[in-house]
Image: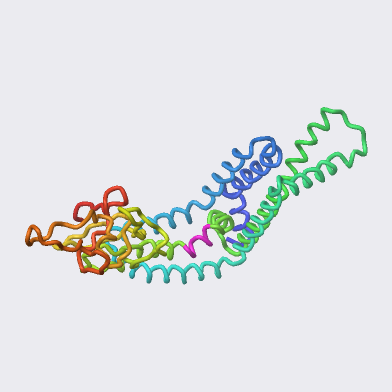
Amino acid sequence: MTRAEWVRSQIRSPWHWGSMLALWGLGYYTLGWAGRGHMTAAMAGWGLFLLVETAPMLWTMLAFAGAMLFLSRIFPPAAIIFLIIGIVFFILRIRYVIQNAQLLASGFLVYLVYYHLFADHMHLGGKLVEACYKLVTLNHLFALSWQLRHFLAYLAILLAAGLPVLLVHLFLWMAYRKGYESRNALTVLFGLPLVVISFLLPFLKILGAFDGAAFTDAGHGGHMAPDGFHGTGDGYAPTGDHPVPVHHVNGYFRSTPGGGTTYVHPHVATNPDGILENNLSYHGPHPQPGLADAPHAPAGAGHTVQGPNVDTVPGLGKEKKEKEL
């Protein structure tokens, strides 16, 4: 098959002419009716069009993101492996951009053209329709009936909507000459936003996997979050006669004495200052063994004492634990 025959076969493919007709119809509807209270329907149509055109790339991204999220939940230490995978995919995406640079640049121009047509309440789009109306009416050179002028107005909108489609057709024709198949060319041309997201997606998922999972101290039995104590001390919870500085603890995984793993939900805890009465669960001194009449100072009365650091109480973010995984 010669190059000319290949180009003709791709232009005649259902994906090419079907996409061109859909793009023309969406442009016609947006220019003619979106400004009359139909903007939501127009946006829904454009969203559906882009979903169909970029479906292969979108499904691949969703499958990859879902697999990473699932594996990071059932096996948190795998975040290191995901980091390596993310770097590999990042390099592959760079290669993908280099190989499809011309078509991606064409897609950027297409998005730019349609953005300027429809932005600012379709100011530029309205001017284009007005120019097309002057063209089809020969700048009102002849007196026309009302019915004919009404018909020519619709024709002007069709012409204005078709001009960007011709630009898209030209870009696709150039891609076909380079050996692109119609389906792949359309995916690359309209998939520029997904390409940008794909550069960030692996690392975003990796950060989500690291959050409270990969760096949790497996032998730690306290209530410290995986990222350590954090908080400015600006938060206070009233307990008795004085406020207690508190901070928020992110959810994290921890090991149990039996060798299992539990998940601790996010909660509010007191700052680890070593003062017993600053614990949210402190409700006054406990009776000390000794003589009944012997006075004794309240526990932790103004002194730093070493004791169990119970950081949570009901109503202020009590720690919740699930069953052992």
Q: Quadrant of residue 161?
A: top right
Residue 60 is situated, as x and y percent measured from the top left of the image, at 43, 57
Question: Split into 4 quadrants, where in the image is the C terminus?
Answer: bottom left
Residue 45 is situated, as x and y percent measured from the top left of the image, at 58, 42
Is 313 one of the magenta-colored residues?
A: no
Highlighted range, magenta: 194-200
- Please count the marks in the image: 0
Residue 197 is situated, as x and y percent measured from the top left of the image, at 50, 60
| Picture residue at 48% right of the left edge, 62% below the top | 198
Residue at the front extreme, as displayed? 293
Side of 223 where 64 appears, left or right: right
Side of 220 where 184 appears, left or right: right
Q: Inspect this view and state whether residue 68 appears.
A: no
Side of 259 where 144 appears, left or right: right
| Picture residue at 49% right of the left edge, 51% below the top | 55
Comparing 200 with 246, the one in front is 246
Question: Split into 4 quadrants, where in the image is the N terminus?
Answer: bottom right
| Picture residue at 75% right of the left edge, 44% below the top | 159
Residue at the left extreme, as displayed? 291
- In the displayed structure, 218 sits above or below 124; it is below
Side of 203 where 289 appears, left or right: left
Q: Inspect this view and state whether residue 155 appears.
A: yes
| Picture residue at 85% right of the left edge, 42% below the top | 134
Is 196 one of the magenta-colored residues?
A: yes
Residue 195 is situated, as x and y percent measured from the top left of the image, at 52, 61
- In the displayed structure, 107 sits above or below 127; it is below
Comparing 107 with 312, the one in front is 312
Q: In which quarter of the image is residue 221?
A: bottom left
